[in-house]
């Protein structure tokens, strides 16, 4: 990391800084606006949870960072993604190839289909090293593969077996091994436990925490499960309508004193064992049509506290002590 | 050990298939109009002469008896002799088989060697000019019947351009046109199949994983996608092989290749039952074996297929 | 471990594939070598810019003939019979006592001369001396007797050696052939395909099977090999009694597709194409290739079934058809107008053919046809014309069908059948009409008897008495008479046929041949024979 590459970085310990990112999908029917001015900061070694409903744009964000949006369909129209001083949107593909798998790794949601059925497990992990560390001798690569397998709890003797010979949980471990073998600086984990059952889920999270400690990688954990966020993450960003509507530390947000109405709604959805209730309290309405860019606040239609200004003007962020909320309710209080 | 057992099992399974096919064929042939003895002896033969020949050939016996005798002979590897010339069927067939097989194999090689890259290219550059162009050519090839295409090519390449000989066998040049004509149809289906298969594979999650690992697009296609997309392609080859043997008839006719297809067609026209039966048995065995080979190759490519169970 | 499995599997599949090919290889060598016979012309053809066929005449000693139907029976008098395709080889491997010229006349061959007895029952043949078989044995009366005895007993003996009774050896070079009753056309049978003299001592040695496999004759060419479905090779007989043939090797190549035949001729792959379609010949526009035609000894006639229950039983119906057929149109459809129209079911080249003007001719008259139809008891029932599918006769039948429709016969059906089914139906005599090329090896008006016979292979028990007894009497008379006196007899037969409207003679069929311009000595033969002896390269 040379000094020159750090030009443009605002804070030196921000590993990843996403500013005002607009991403759309150009389908045959219409243009789908997935991200509408999303901004995010991730420090080195941080554990950020990215929370939101399905369709909020979380996966799109992760794919955008790696520039793996579907070719021809996905388009980044505005904004910047600054990673370690470089604006990734301005880099050539060869730069990205070097980045993927080595500096920034990603694990995907469904472990059953994430592995190539015709290659052995060991080969697939080895490939990461082959792609990025050309000078490393063969024996060292093999040793690294064995080490990482052991670390994730898979006997290295099984490295010549094929993915279909492993269970779902083990497959996810292999995927994690593949993502971490190159010791990346940033790990994007897109709902890594959603497809697994609860006990395995706990194991996987445990594993991820250990590995994160070992390699000191930053982790962006994308999930819709608030419980997982509480278990694993230090900070949280709540995504709705292609924007971050609230961000802060876990303590700040989970204190439930000041929250964006959406976040509040999310918490209300979780059934409370102590209270006897006959019905769940969901959030009214449905997510806005992503083909239309909202005029005012993206949450206006579903918000209990919606006012006239909410419908006409987009709110700006209110921040206090690192806890940010994108809502007129709070900006009004500020008097801005 | 399981490979051998599987192979043996598959070969043994051919036996009921052969019995079924030959019996149906035997029945159909016996119902076909046309008196063989009369055909052999010619129009002017007397009734006694015809009856005598029929008795000699065993044609006066009931169908099942004749069939039984024939199959017993087959078990002893005696396929009989041609009714119109007396040649030993097995020798006749095996003498002509290499020509048909050569043209069939060459045509499939041609179709695969040209079709797969074109299909893959179309898949990679989906909706591009190349994609539409290749699809158009494939459709054109499928629409052109072999007998027309063959004669057209003869006129162009042999008569006008003088690059190739019109017919026969002997040098490598003789095999170019027959293989291309026979392979034209297969080429079209190979292009489509590779394209579809690759498109299918490209959309899979593990391809996305490979990209996320930092593999270049070339590596993604060649290293990750290829093996997986090969499986339906190999299966397709097995399926088309039987069709290629059938299509060889037309090609062999046009290009005067002394192969099995022409032998079979002429035998059916002349009602030379031993040749028809013998040829069909041999072809069934060959097609069965080719399918077996294809299945084994598939199993080699796809580790999910396991014979041990 | 997995690798080992893979390697083993690979080896198994590879060995299976090898097994497939290997079992064919040893016999493939024989077939392959035979099939690899190609003239240097094929290679030189690629170098020339002019007509490939012109360039191909670089080879001076081989002729390649392309044919759809191949010879496969190389012994004519055996139990397997033989046909026109076989005659391609037979007429060159063997000689007969008499030779059938391209125009249908007879000339001396192995017999220098012959006499006929007064009563027409004995033919005395004086044999040529010093003629050698291919195995070196001399041809004598013994061989002639054997040939006739064996041939007459065979499947087509009664058709070609008509009325044959016995053969006596007078001396080594003289034989007497006795007939049961006079048959003026007997010499044509002598010159036919089963008249080729074979070697008795060789036959005694190898038997019929051996003779089929390796035939021996006195002809200009010796048999070399036969590869079924591919080719037959003949090589020149250096000691041929007429003199050494100019062409040293002849390959009869089986080429199923007629387009390929012509293209190959133009390309120099073949030197001669047997029986190309006339319209193809007419369109040939290549200086290196030419074609020839000859009236064949066959006539294309529509024979009508007058004995079974159906429209054809009524003479008015038949006369309506007779008057409605426009033969020029039919000629156009079948032979592009190149054939000669026939008014009687006898070719001009036939022995005993009546002179023009001595017989009645049915006129083409549409109005009369309609009148006949009105007078008949035609009730619209189906009337089928049987033809071989894909043949020119099918085309002719369709033209006739249209012509009949224009006079009001709407139920005429063209029944085109494949060869085997066609023969079956032909034999069953359930057809209402049949159009075929009646090619007669016996180049004589006596061949009228085919469709008017009471003693043919048709089983009278099945059909009753099929035809006209008056005609049968006249046929016997024609056989017994000699020379020009026969002509009026046949004139009378033709008149009866015309009056009764049994048949509608159409055209004298045409034999065609297409060949390389540089090949000399080529002649279209009336029976479709190919006498390679006369060929030479320029």
Image (cartoon, coloured by chain):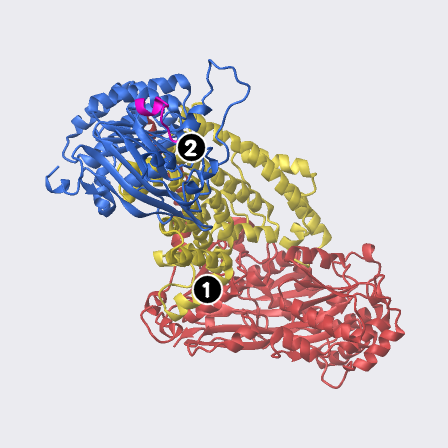
Chain colours: A blue, B yellow, C red
User: Is residue C197 visible to the viewer in this orientation of the structure?
Assistant: no
Nearer the observer, A13 or B107? A13
Based on the picture, tell me whether residue A255 belongs to the magenta stretch: yes
Q: Nearer the viewer, mark 2 or mark 1?
A: 2
Q: Residue furthest bottom?
A: C357
Q: Where is residue B33 drawn, in percent x and y?
A: 69, 51
Q: Do the residues at discs 2 and 1 belong to one chain? A: no
Q: Quadrant of the C terminus of chain A?
A: top left
Say which quarter of the image contains residue A139: top left
Q: Residues within 10 Å of mark 2 (few under 14, many from 20)?
A: some
Quick check: A54 left or right of C489? left
Say which quarter of the image contains residue C15: top left
Q: Residues within 10 Å of mark 1 (few under 14, many from 20)?
A: many
Q: Chain of mark 1?
A: C
Query: Which residue is disc 2 drawn over?
Result: A53
Q: How many marks?
A: 2
Q: How far apart in space, not on screen, are marks 2 and 1 (Cα)?
A: 94 Å
Query: Which residue is disc 1 drawn over?
Result: C221
Q: Where is residue C213 drawn, in percent x and y?
A: 50, 52
Say above or below: B15 vs C228: above
- The residue depicted at 47 percent of the width and 46 percent of the height is B240
- The residue depicted at 47 percent of the width and 33 percent of the height is A304
Say above or below: A7 vs B161: above
Task: State the extent of the magenta-drawn residues as a range.
Answer: A251-260
Quick check: B92 left or right of C420? left
Nearer the observer, B247 or A293? A293
Element type at mark 2: loop
Element type at mark 1: strand
Based on the picture, tell me whether residue B107 belongs to the magenta stretch: no
Q: Quadrant of the N terminus of chain A?
A: top left
């Amino acid at each position: 990391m040379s000094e020159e590459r750090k030009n443009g970085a605002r804070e030196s310990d921000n590993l990843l800084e996403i500013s005002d990112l607009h991403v759309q999908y150009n389908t045959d029917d219409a243009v789908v606006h997935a991200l509408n001015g999303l901004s995010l900061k991730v420090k080195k070694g941080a554990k950020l949870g990215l929370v939101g409903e399905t369709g909020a744009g979380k996966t799109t964000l992760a794919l955008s960072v790696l520039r793996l949006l579907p070719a021809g369909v996905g388009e980044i129209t505005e904004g910047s993604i600054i990673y370690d001083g470089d604006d990734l949107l301005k880099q050539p593909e060869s730069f990205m190839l070097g980045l993927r798998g080595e500096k920034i790794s990603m694990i995907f949601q469904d472990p059953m289909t994430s592995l190539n059925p015709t290659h052995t497990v060991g080969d697939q992990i080895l490939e990461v090293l082959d792609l990025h560390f050309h000078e490393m001798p063969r024996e060292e690569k093999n040793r690294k593969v064995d080490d990482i397998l052991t670390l994730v709890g898979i006997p290295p003797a099984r490295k010549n077996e094929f993915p279909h010979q492993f269970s779902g949980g083990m497959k996810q471990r292999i995927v994690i091994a593949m993502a971490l073998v190159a010791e990346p600086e940033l790990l994007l984990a897109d709902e890594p436990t959603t497809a697994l059952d609860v006990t395995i889920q706990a194991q996987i999270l445990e594993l991820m925490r250990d590995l994160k400690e070992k390699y000191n990688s930053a982790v962006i954990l994308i999930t819709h499960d608030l419980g997982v966020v509480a278990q694993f993450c230090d900070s949280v960003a709540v995504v709705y309508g292609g924007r971050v509507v609230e961000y802060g530390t876990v303590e700040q947000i989970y204190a439930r004193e000041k929250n964006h109405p959406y976040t509040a709604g999310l918490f209300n959805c979780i059934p409370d064992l102590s209270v006897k209730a006959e019905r769940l309290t969901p959030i009214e309405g449905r997510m806005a049509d992503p083909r239309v860019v909202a005029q005012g606040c993206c949450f206006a239609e579903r918000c209990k506290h919606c006012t006239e200004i909410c419908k006409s003007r987009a709110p700006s962020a209110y921040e206090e002590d690192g806890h940010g909320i994108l809502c007129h309710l709070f900006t009004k209080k500020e008097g801005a | 050990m399981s490979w051998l057992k599987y192979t043996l099992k598959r070969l043994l399974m051919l036996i009921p298939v052969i019995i079924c096919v030959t019996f149906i064929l035997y029945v159909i042939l016996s119902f076909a109009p046309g008196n063989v003895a009369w055909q052999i002896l010619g129009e002017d033969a007397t009734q006694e002469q015809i009856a005598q020949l029929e008795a000699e050939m065993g044609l006066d016996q009931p169908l099942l008896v004749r069939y039984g005798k024939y199959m017993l002979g087959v078990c002893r590897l005696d396929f009989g002799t041609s009714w119109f010339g007396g040649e030993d069927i097995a020798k006749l067939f095996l003498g002509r088989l290499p020509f048909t097989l050569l043209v069939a194999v060459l045509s499939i090689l041609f179709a695969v060697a040209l079709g797969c890259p074109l299909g893959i290219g179309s898949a990679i550059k989906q909706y591009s000019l190349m994609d539409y162009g290749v699809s158009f050519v494939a459709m054109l090839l499928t629409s052109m019947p072999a007998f027309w295409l063959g004669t057209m090519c003869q006129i162009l390449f042999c008569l006008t351009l003088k690059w190739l000989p019109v017919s026969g066998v002997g040098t490598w040049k003789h095999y170019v046109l027959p293989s291309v004509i026979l392979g034209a149809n297969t080429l079209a289906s190979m292009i489509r199949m590779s394209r579809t298969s690759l498109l299918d594979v490209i959309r899979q999650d593990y391809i996305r994983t490979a990209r996320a690992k930092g593999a270049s697009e070339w590596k993604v296609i060649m290293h990750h996608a290829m093996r997986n997309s090969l499986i339906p392609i190999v299966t397709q080859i097995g399926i088309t092989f039987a069709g290629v043997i059938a299509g060889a008839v037309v090609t062999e006719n046009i290009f005067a290749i002394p192969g099995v297809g022409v032998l079979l067609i002429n035998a059916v026209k002349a009602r030379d039952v031993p040749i028809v039966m013998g040829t069909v048995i041999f072809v069934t065995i060959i097609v069965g074996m080719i399918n077996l080979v294809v299945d084994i190759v598939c199993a080699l490519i796809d580790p999910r297929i396991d014979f041990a169970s | 471990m997995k690798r080992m499995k893979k390697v083993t599997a690979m080896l198994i599949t590879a060995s299976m594939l090898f097994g497939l090919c290997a079992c064919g290889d040893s016999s493939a060598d024989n077939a392959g070598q035979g099939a690899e016979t190609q003239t240097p012309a094929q290679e030189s053809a690629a170098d020339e810019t002019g007509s490939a066929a012109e360039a191909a005449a670089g080879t001076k000693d081989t002729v390649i003939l392309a044919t759809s139907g191949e010879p496969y029976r190389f012994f004519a008098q055996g139990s397997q019979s033989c046909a026109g395709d076989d005659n391609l080889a037979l007429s060159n491997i063997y000689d007969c006592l008499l030779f059938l010229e391209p125009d249908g006349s007879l000339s001396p061959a192995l017999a220098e001369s012959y006499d006929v007895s007064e009563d027409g029952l004995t033919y005395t043949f004086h044999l040529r001396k010093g003629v050698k078989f291919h195995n070196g044995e001399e041809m004598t009366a013994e061989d002639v007797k054997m040939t006739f005895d064996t041939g007459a007993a065979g499947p087509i003996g009664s058709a070609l050696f008509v009325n044959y009774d016995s053969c006596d050896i007078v001396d080594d070079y003289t034989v007497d052939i006795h007939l049961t009753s006079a048959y003026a056309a007997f010499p044509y049978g002598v010159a036919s395909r089963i008249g080729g003299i074979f070697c008795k001592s060789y036959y005694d040695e190898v038997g019929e099977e051996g003779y089929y496999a390796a035939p021996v004759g006195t002809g200009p060419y010796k048999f070399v090999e036969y590869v079924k479905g591919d080719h037959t090779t003949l090589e020149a007989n250096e000691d041929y009694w007429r003199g050494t043939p100019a062409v040293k090797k002849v390959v009869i190549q089986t080429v199923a597709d007629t387009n390929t035949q012509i293209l190959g001729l133009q390309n120099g792959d073949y030197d001669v194409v047997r029986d190309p379609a006339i319209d193809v010949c007419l369109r040939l526009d290549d200086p290196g290739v030419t074609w020839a035609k000859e009236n064949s000894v066959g006539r294309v006639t529509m024979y009508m079934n007058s004995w079974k229950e159906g429209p054809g039983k009524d003479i008015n119906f038949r006369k309506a058809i007779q008057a409605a057929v426009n033969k020029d149109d039919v000629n156009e459809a079948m032979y592009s107008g190149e054939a000669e129209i026939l008014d009687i079911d006898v070719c001009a080249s036939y022995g005993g053919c009546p002179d023009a003007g001595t017989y009645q001719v049915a006129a083409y008259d549409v109005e009369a046809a309609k009148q006949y139809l009105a007078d008949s008891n035609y009730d619209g029932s189906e009337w089928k014309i049987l033809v071989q599918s894909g043949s020119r006769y099918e085309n002719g039948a369709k033209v006739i069908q249209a012509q009949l429709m224009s006079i009001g016969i709407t139920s005429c059906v063209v029944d085109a059948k494949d060869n085997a089914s066609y023969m079956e139906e032909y034999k069953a005599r359930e057809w209402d009409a049949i159009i075929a090329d009646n090619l007669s090896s016996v180049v004589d008006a006596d061949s009228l008897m085919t469709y008017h016979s009471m003693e043919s292979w048709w089983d009278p028990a099945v059909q009753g008495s099929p035809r006209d007894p008056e005609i049968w009497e006249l046929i016997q008379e024609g056989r017994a008479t000699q020379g020009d006196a026969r002509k009026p007899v046949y004139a009378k037969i033709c008149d009866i046929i015309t009056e009764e409207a049994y048949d509608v003679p159409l055209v004298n069929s045409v034999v065609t041949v297409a060949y390389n311009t540089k090949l000399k000595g080529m002649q279209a033969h009336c029976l479709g024979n190919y006498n390679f002896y006369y060929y030479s390269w320029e």
